[in-house]
Image: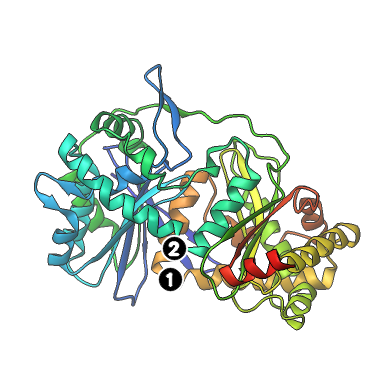
Amino acid sequence: MEFTKFTNERLGESYYSAKHPSGLRILVCPKEGFGSTYAVIGTHFGSINSTFINNGRKITVPDGTAHYLEHKLFESEEGDAFKQYAKTGASANAYTSFDVTCYLFSCTERFEESLGILFDLIRSPYFTPETVAKEQGIIGQEIKMYDDSPEWRSNMNLFQGMYQFHPINKDIAGTVETIAEITPEILYDCYNSYYNLNNMVLCIAGNADPGQVAQVADSKLKENDPVITESIFPEEPYEVGKTYIEQILPVAVPLFSLGFKEAGKDEPVTTKESICTSIILEAFAGEGSELYRELLDKKLINSSFASEYMDGSGYRFISFSGESRDPELAAEIIRKAVRELHEKGISKEDFENARNCTYGRIVRSWDSPSAIATDLLYSEFTGRDVFEASKLISEITADDVNERLKEQLDADNSCLSVIKGIDSAAEDKDV
């Protein structure tokens, strides 16, 4: 296995990439002088991949299956992987998102041993009716915990309001009812369809050397024949399903999530589109923007206010969220500002300031091993060059950004999700 070196002179950064004989894509970014190492291995399989075709067979799995599988892979006939990591001193974790499932660890010593544990974890599935049933109670408690989380409910309610058919409107962990339907056979179907090494990527950053990574991979991984799995998604209309959703939870200050849905596409956004959107959000709602100052001066937001762009197979949207004593008024002001933004566009001065801020974030991300490894992982899954953003940002113009704006922030295609406290709900009812 030979590594190819990729370098960005402007950033002064390099990483190495190779395709292991097993089919696994490996990317390593050595950081001289760093004492810690961060490793993440991921598969392009998340909660939205609930219907797929493998070997000519159409399979539909219960909501929450990808997350359930993530939990179960930590168990093997040899024992719990967390206990093995404890012996090496590594800090390990995993997560399932809408699009991917990732397993990771960070360490300051005994890196090779921890990497070997990571390889064993993803290559040793062990599912029996007894072990699968045992996990239902554990994940059921996790589901209830998220159901009681105001921030989580605010976001999930937003997704459920915006999307009528796309599975992004389902909770990543599923429900207590859906996970009760999961069997060892279902988990093996998903594992064999998506955990083929040709569908996975390993990214490492920090105190690591490509040679030592290759040695561990050679000792642990065997050649895999590629497996072609096609995920299937329902057709999703452009329009939001609901414009307003409210839930009552014990919160001191109401929370809101305001989402602006756009046309979903099968292919991921390009690097240029991503940068333009980042500049739009910085100019429109960053801490130096007129909108941010207005909302802050009127005491409608606090430091929790944030904006985000999310995209994946069949979904794309921008959201604004945070705490607010009057979520409806905050949303009204944001929608009004959106309409004015489309009328006037982003000025060249605001564009320059926002572009500089965006570039600064790109540069700072290369000081974090976890950010580097995660960016490398997603660049592989989306087909984007991780260095391309720093190259393109100097070439993008205000006209490019305003052209991108035409596809985003449709004030007439938005949904407001609000979490109100018990006292606030009672006051609204009295009124």
Residue type marked 2: Ile
Rendering coords of residue 292 (x, y %)? 73, 75
Quote the CA–CA distance across marks 2 and 1. Answer: 6 Å
Residue sticking out furthest to the right: 343
Q: Is residue 240 left or right of residue 336?
A: left
Rendering coords of residue 389 (x, y %)? 60, 58
Residue at point 18%, 69% (across, down):
89
The answer to whether the residue labelled 2 contacts the one labelled 1, judged by CB atoms less than 8 Å apart, is yes
Residue 357 appears in the figure: yes
Rendering coords of residue 150 (x, y %)? 51, 64
Local secondary structure at mark 1: loop
Q: Which residue is mark 2?
A: 372
| Residue 368 numbered mark, or none | 1
Q: Is residue 75 left or right of residue 409?
A: left
Residue closest to the eye, 242 or 1: 242
Disc 2 crowd rating (10 Å Cα; few below 14, some 14-19, many 20+) is many
Q: Is residue 376 left or right of residue 88?
A: right
Instruction: Answer above or below: position of 384 versus 426.
Output: above
Local secondary structure at mark 2: helix
